[in-house]
């Protein structure tokens, strides 16, 4: 009987301990401030932004540009967005990427379309935006993939690489270009420009596999 009472008491103490621990954990989640009230419903929409006096907020449904504005020469909408600096070139396409190198240079990259009509430069544009009030183009990358990488233009920050695939008009191609931007992001250095998945690649890889197999079958003493 005493053993049963002892087990019952231990069970009650364990349950009590768990309840106290849970209560402390829940109290800690609120920082111990009983005045905080987060019991309201989670909002299903983002509150409408409060724009500044010089802004040009949207006048129709979000994302819509009325035909009357387009016909009059639409100049864009803005809300809490001020122009700090500008670099005017031949226009841009779909994608941009950003990187800051170890020297503190802040660089922006944006792609352009493959068309060459009325163009002074082709390919991906490298912009030195270290001084945001005076961004300057520092390089034009015109290797095969960079002529029109479309949405594939990306920066790998950990490996400090800029890369893209040939995507003329969104159709894609086998070419793949990789640039090193680690030392000076203003002047990307080409590491490789290769066509992947082609017959030549397949034959080369096949020869390598055969060579590896022969080496494994006939190890040197």
Image (tube, grey):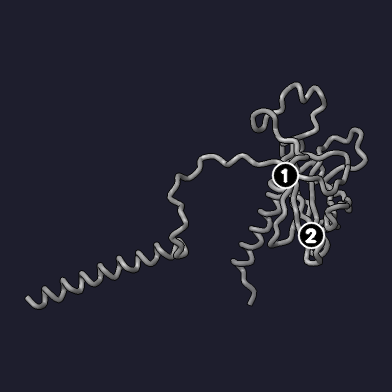
> Foreground: 69 or 53?
53
Q: Residue at x 46, y 52 (%)?
A: 38
- Direction front: furthest residue: 35
Quick check: can you spot residue 144?
A: no
Pointer 1 residue: 80
Secondary structure state at the residue bearing disc 2: loop
- Locate residue 180: give its quadrant: bottom right
User: What percent of the width, then of the height, locates residue 23?
Assistant: 35, 64
Callout 1–callout 2 Cβ contact below 8 Å:
no
**Quadrant (top left/top right/bottom left/bottom right) for the N terminus:** bottom left
User: What percent of the width, then of the height, locates residue 66?
Assistant: 71, 24
User: What percent of the width, then of the height, locates residue 164?
Assistant: 74, 48
Q: Residue at x 67, y 32 (%)?
A: 63
> Foreground: 34 or 88?
34
- Locate residue 156: give its quadrant: bottom right
> Foreground: 115 or 25?
25
Q: Residue at x 9, y 78 (%)?
A: 2
Quick check: can you spot residue 140?
A: yes
Secondary structure state at the residue bearing disc 1: loop
Question: Above or below — where is 83 with respect to 106?
Answer: above
- Direction left: furthest residue: 1
User: What percent of the width, then of the height, locates residue 163?
Assistant: 74, 52
Pointer 2 residue: 181
Q: Earlier in the sequence, mark 1 or mark 2?
A: 1
| In the displayed structure image, the side of residue 135 where residue 216 appears, left or right | left
């Amino acid at each position: 009987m005493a053993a049963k009472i002892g087990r019952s008491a231990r069970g009650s103490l364990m349950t009590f301990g768990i309840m106290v621990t849970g209560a402390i954990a829940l109290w800690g989640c609120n920082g111990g401030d009983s005045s905080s009230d987060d019991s309201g419903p989670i909002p299903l929409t983002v509150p409408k932004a409060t724009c500044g006096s010089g802004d040009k907020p949207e006048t129709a449904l979000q994302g819509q540009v009325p035909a009357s504005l387009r016909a009059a020469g639409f100049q864009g909408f803005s809300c809490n967005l001020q122009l700090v600096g500008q670099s005017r070139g031949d226009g841009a396409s779909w994608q941009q990427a950003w990187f800051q190198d170890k020297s503190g240079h802040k660089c922006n990259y944006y792609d352009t379309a493959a068309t060459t009509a009325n163009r002074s430069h082709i390919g991906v544009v490298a912009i030195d935006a270290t001084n945001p009030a005076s961004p300057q183009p520092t390089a034009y990358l015109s290797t095969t993939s960079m002529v029109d990488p479309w949405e594939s233009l990306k920066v790998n920050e950990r490996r400090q690489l800029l890369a893209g695939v040939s995507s003329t008009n969104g159709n894609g191609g086998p070419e793949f270009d990789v640039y090193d931007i680690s030392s000076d992001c203003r002047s990307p250095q080409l590491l490789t420009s290769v066509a992947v998945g082609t017959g030549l690649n397949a034959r080369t890889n096949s020869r390598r596999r055969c060579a590896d197999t022969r080496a494994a079958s006939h190890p040197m003493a």
